[in-house]
Amino acid sequence: MGFYQQTIFPRMMEWALGTETCSAERRRTLADARGEVLEIGFGTGLNLPQYPPSAIAKLTIVDPAELLPERVVARIAAAPFPVEHARLDAERLPFDDARFDTVVSTWTLCSIPDPVAALREVRRVLRPEGRFLFLEHGLSERPWVARAQHLWNPIQKVIACGCNVDRRIDQVIAASGLVTKKLERFDLAGELPLFSAMYRGVATS
């Protein structure tokens, strides 16, 4: 991993996704997290303060990258529940079937090389009554924005280290075999149209 990917881009990501607006959307998404929780695409740990602390028995976090490690260590140390950190790809999870009560993904499916494979793993490790909570950006419902996203996406993948702006998150989830029980589409306040189309919801196995 080069200097840009390891040092510059994580700070850009913190600036873009660490706003109070984004924190409020994280809190709304994570409000229903319960029990043994798996978070894929942990990043720099911006979700940690947004979990409902009394509802989490343990949080397991996986991410193939190690971004801003000093901040990550500090955020994990401040967490009010046990946190286990593993440097893993979401497409290949080393966990038993039906282990987790909740799996969480926030602004992650845009960057996973094979998001359908990752979500098949999510489906496998979810307990039968478990829930997959997601908050993602993706393809806009507005045709002119969607066209612009398709044009911009090759550049986006370079400057944002593999992030895609034009994935249909609902279709990716459906292709994995997960069943979406709730889906909210909205535009993130204050964000440019290329990046503002949000998908928030709950899916089950």
Image (tube, helix red, strand yellow):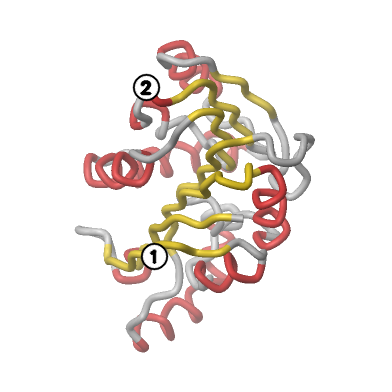
Q: Which mark is residue 53?
A: 2
Which element type, helix, strand or loop, lies under badge 2? helix
- Looking at the picture, how far across and down is residue 106, in whole percent? 46, 47
x, y percent for residue 12: 41, 43
Where's residue 14, x and y in %? 39, 38
**Image mark count:** 2
Label 1 SS: strand
Q: How would you rate the neighbour count of disc 2 (Cα within 10 Å): few for under 14, some for 14-19, many for 20 or more? A: some
Label 1 packing within 10 angstroms: few (<14), some (14-19), many (20+): some
As shown in the figure, which amino acid type bears the numbered disc 2? Pro
* x then y, percent, for residue 148: 41, 81
Give the residue drawn at x 51%, y 17%: 70
Please identify the quadrant where the N terminus is shown: top right
- Amino acid identity at mark 1: Leu
In the depicted structure, whether residue 134 falls above or below residue 150: above
Residue plotted at (77% across, 35% down): 96
Q: Residue at left 50%, top 28%?
A: 35
User: Quick one: label 1 or label 2, which is nearer the N terminus?
Assistant: 2
Which label belongs to residue 183?
1
